[in-house]
C-alpha cells in the first residue's frame, strides 16, 4: 500500500507539469493584453502613451520571452509562490485564492454530502421495490434531475424564494467559524441547487449497482442463513454496491469545483467562481493559473483517496 501511494504521488508531478503548460500557454493564446487592459481601465477609455504601455509590460514581465515567463512562473510555483495579482497591487495570487477557495470547497462538500443523503435511499428503495410507486417516483426524479441544467435550477430557486418567501441571496458572506448558523443559511440553497443533478445521477448508479449485487450468490446465502433483510441490504449488498457510487462521487466532486462557478454568481457566493470570471476578463494571468493548478491538485488528491477507499470497502482490491 505504501509503495502504491508513493507511486501515485510521484505521478502528480508530470500531471501538474502538463496542466501548468496547458493553462499557461492557453492564457497567452487568448486575445487580450493585461498591460493594455490595466492602462485603459475597465471602461476602456483610459489614455496612455506607447511608452507607458511598454513600461507597464516590463513591470508585469509580459514583454519577456514566453518560455522565460513560464520558467519564472513555474519556478515560483515550486516554492508556493504564484506571483502577484496584476490588478490588486501588493496582493499575491495565493492570498486571493486562500481567501476564496475555502468557500467553494465548503459549497462543493455540502453539495456532495447532500447528494449522498438523498441519493442512497432513493437508489436502494428503487432496487428493492422494482416497478413499485416508489421506484417509479425515483425514476421520474432522477431523469428530471439529470436533464435539468444546474444554472437553470439555481435561477428558478432564487426566483421562487424571492417571490414566495421574500428571500434574496445575502450580499455579505459570513465565515463558518465566525457565524456558523448564518453561514449555513447562506450556503444551504446554493449547495442544494448544486447537488440536485449530482443526486439524480448518484441515485441511478446506486439503483443499478444494487440490482446487480442483489442477484449475487452470497446475498441468497445470507438470506438463507436467516439474516434480517436490513442486515442483508446495508451490511452486505450496499457495501459492495458502494464501489461504483464512490467512483462517480469522486468524479462529481471534481466536477462540482468547476460547476460551482455559475451557482456562485447566481447566489452571490464569494468563491473562486466570481474570482475566476473576473480574472479571465481582466487577463490576470497569475490568478487564473493559480486557480487551475489548485483545482488540479484537489482532483488528483480526490482520485487517490477514492482508490484507497476502494481497498477499505473491498478487501479483494490490493495495491501492490
Image (tube, rainbow, N blue to C red):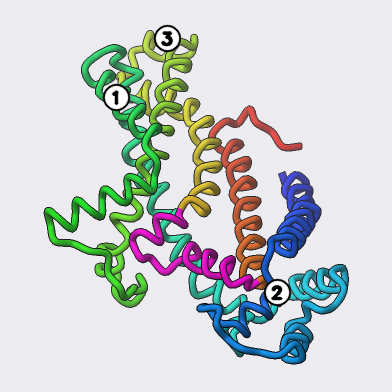
Question: First in sequence: mark 2 or mark 1?
Answer: 2
The answer to which quarter of the image holds residue 291 is: bottom right
State if disc 1 and disc 3 touch (CB < 8 Å).
no
Residue 87 lies, in percent from the top left, at: 59, 82
Residues 317 and 192: in front is 192
Image quarter of the C terminus: top right
Q: Residue at x 60, y 58 (%)?
A: 295
In the drawing, what numbered circle is on residue 80? 2
Q: Residue at x 84, y 69 (%)?
A: 66
Write the start and end of the magenta stretch as one range.
Answer: 260-284
Residue 129, above or below 12: above
Give the residue at mark 1. Answer: 140
Q: Is residue 106 left or right of residue 54?
A: left
Badge 2 density bin: few <14, some 14–19, many ≥20, Cα 10 Å: few
Can you tell which of label 3 and label 2 is closer to the viewer?
2
Which secondary structure lies at badge 1? helix
Q: CA distance from mark 3 to mark 1?
A: 30 Å
Give the residue at mark 3. Answer: 220
Residue 308, above or below 240: below
Q: CA distance from mark 2 to mark 1?
A: 48 Å
Amino acid at each position: 500500500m505504501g509503495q502504491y501511494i508513493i507511486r501515485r504521488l510521484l505521478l502528480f508531478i508530470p500531471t501538474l507539469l502538463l496542466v501548468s503548460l496547458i493553462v499557461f500557454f492557453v492564457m497567452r493564446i487568448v486575445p487580450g493584453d493585461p498591460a493594455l487592459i490595466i492602462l485603459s481601465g475597465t471602461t476602456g477609455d483610459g489614455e496612455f502613451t506607447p511608452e507607458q504601455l511598454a513600461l507597464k509590460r516590463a513591470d508585469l514581465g509580459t514583454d519577456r520571452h514566453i518560455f522565460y515567463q513560464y520558467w519564472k512562473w513555474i519556478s515560483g510555483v515550486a516554492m508556493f509562490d504564484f506571483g502577484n495579482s496584476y490588478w490588486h497591487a501588493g496582493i499575491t495570487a495565493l492570498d486571493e485564492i486562500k481567501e476564496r477557495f475555502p468557500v467553494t470547497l465548503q459549497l462543493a462538500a455540502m453539495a456532495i454530502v447532500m447528494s449522498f443523503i438523498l441519493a442512497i435511499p432513493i437508489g436502494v428503495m428503487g432496487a428493492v421495490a422494482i416497478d413499485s410507486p416508489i421506484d417509479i417516483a425515483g425514476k421520474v426524479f432522477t431523469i428530471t434531475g439529470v436533464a435539468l441544467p444546474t444554472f437553470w435550477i439555481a435561477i428558478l430557486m432564487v426566483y421562487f424564494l424571492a417571490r414566495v418567501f421574500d428571500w434574496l441571496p445575502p450580499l455579505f458572506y459570513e465565515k463558518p467559524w465566525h457565524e456558523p448558523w448564518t453561514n449555513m443559511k447562506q450556503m444551504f440553497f446554493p449547495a442544494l441547487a448544486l447537488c440536485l443533478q449530482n443526486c439524480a445521477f448518484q441515485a441511478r448508479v446506486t439503483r443499478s449497482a444494487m440490482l446487480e449485487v442483489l442477484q449475487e450468490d452470497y446475498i441468497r446465502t445470507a438470506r438463507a442463513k436467516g439474516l434480517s433483510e436490513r442486515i442483508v441490504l446495508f451490511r452486505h449488498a450496499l457495501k459492495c454496491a458502494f464501489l461504483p457510487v464512490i467512483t462517480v462521487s469522486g468524479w462529481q466532486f471534481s466536477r462540482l469545483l468547476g460547476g460551482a462557478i455559475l451557482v456562485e454568481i447566481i447566489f452571490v457566493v464569494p468563491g473562486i467562481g466570481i474570482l475566476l470570471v473576473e480574472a479571465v476578463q481582466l487577463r490576470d494571468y497569475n490568478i487564473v493559473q493559480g486557480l487551475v493548478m489548485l483545482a488540479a491538485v484537489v482532483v488528483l488528491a480526490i482520485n487517490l483517496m477514492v482508490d484507497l477507499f476502494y481497498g477499505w470497502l473491498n478487501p479483494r482490491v490490493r495495491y501492490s
